[in-house]
């Protein structure tokens, strides 16, 4: 029986879909890597069937790949949550500061009449929020 590379790639893709890797971008990227590896293997003198088998094994099993995608998705969600908390803090800090400053300027209240601590706490919250957002966007070493 003659080996059909395109049919084998389509079956490989169906296995990926069955394992739950159904997002278009990761699946297209995996297929692109598979095709590149097949070309590389054929450049080393292997026939299509052997090149496909080695390349598919090199990329990995569908379940393992799905687990890796899930891990990356969790990391991304964690970073998004960190950034959102930071943004909330950036918005919440001034919400504490502004009423205190309005009292100070409008009523001429002195700093020792309850205005000082809301300004300090609001500033700390705001600056912590800025740091949190920056930390959320930093790349972490694997």
Image: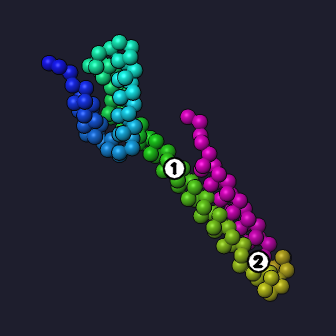
Q: Residue furthest top?
A: 45
Classified by dominant secondary structure, the portion drawn in magenta counts as helix
Residue 26: image location, x then y, percent:
39, 41
Location of residue 84 by image quarter? bottom right
Give the numbered dot on residue 60: none
Residue 48: image location, x then y, percent:
28, 19
**Residue 67 seen in the current view:** no
Give the numbered dot on residue 78: 1
> Mark 1 falls on what kind of element?
helix
Q: Is residue 3 left or right of residue 54?
A: left
Residue at 35% across / 39% down in the picture?
A: 27
Residue at 35% across / 18% down in the picture?
A: 42
Q: Residue furthest left?
A: 1
Q: Which residues are magenta?
A: 114-142
Rendered view: 103 above or below 136: below
Residue identified by numbered label 2: 101
Q: Is residue 121 left or right of residue 32?
A: right
Rendered view: 74 above or below 67: below
Residue at 17% across / 19% down in the picture?
A: 2
Disc on the earlier residue, 2 or 1: 1
Location of residue 54 by image quarter? top left
**Residue 56 seen in the current view:** yes
Residue 125: image location, x then y, percent:
68, 63
> Mark 2 to mark 1: distance in Å?
35 Å
Does the magenta run of residues contain 117?
yes
Q: Nearer the viewer, residue 101 or 40?
A: 40
Rendered view: 68 above or below 101: above
Q: Nearer the viewer, residue 114 or 80?
A: 80
Residue 140: image location, x then y, percent:
59, 40
């Amino acid at each position: 029986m003659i080996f059909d590379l395109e049919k084998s790639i389509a079956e490989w893709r169906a296995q990926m879909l069955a394992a739950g890797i159904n997002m278009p971008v990761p699946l297209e990227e995996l297929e692109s890597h598979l095709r590149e590896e097949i070309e590389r293997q054929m450049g080393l003198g292997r026939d299509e069937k052997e090149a496909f088998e080695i390349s598919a094994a090199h990329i990995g099993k569908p379940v393992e790949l799905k687990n890796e995608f899930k891990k990356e998705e969790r990391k991304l969600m964690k970073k998004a949550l960190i950034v959102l908390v930071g943004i909330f803090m950036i918005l919440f800090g001034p919400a504490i500061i502004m009423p205190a400053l309005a009292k100070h300027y409008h009523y001429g209240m002195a700093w020792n009449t309850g205005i000082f601590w809301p300004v300090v706490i609001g500033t700390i919250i705001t600056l912590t929020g800025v740091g949190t957002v920056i930390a959320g966007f930093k790349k972490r070493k694997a």
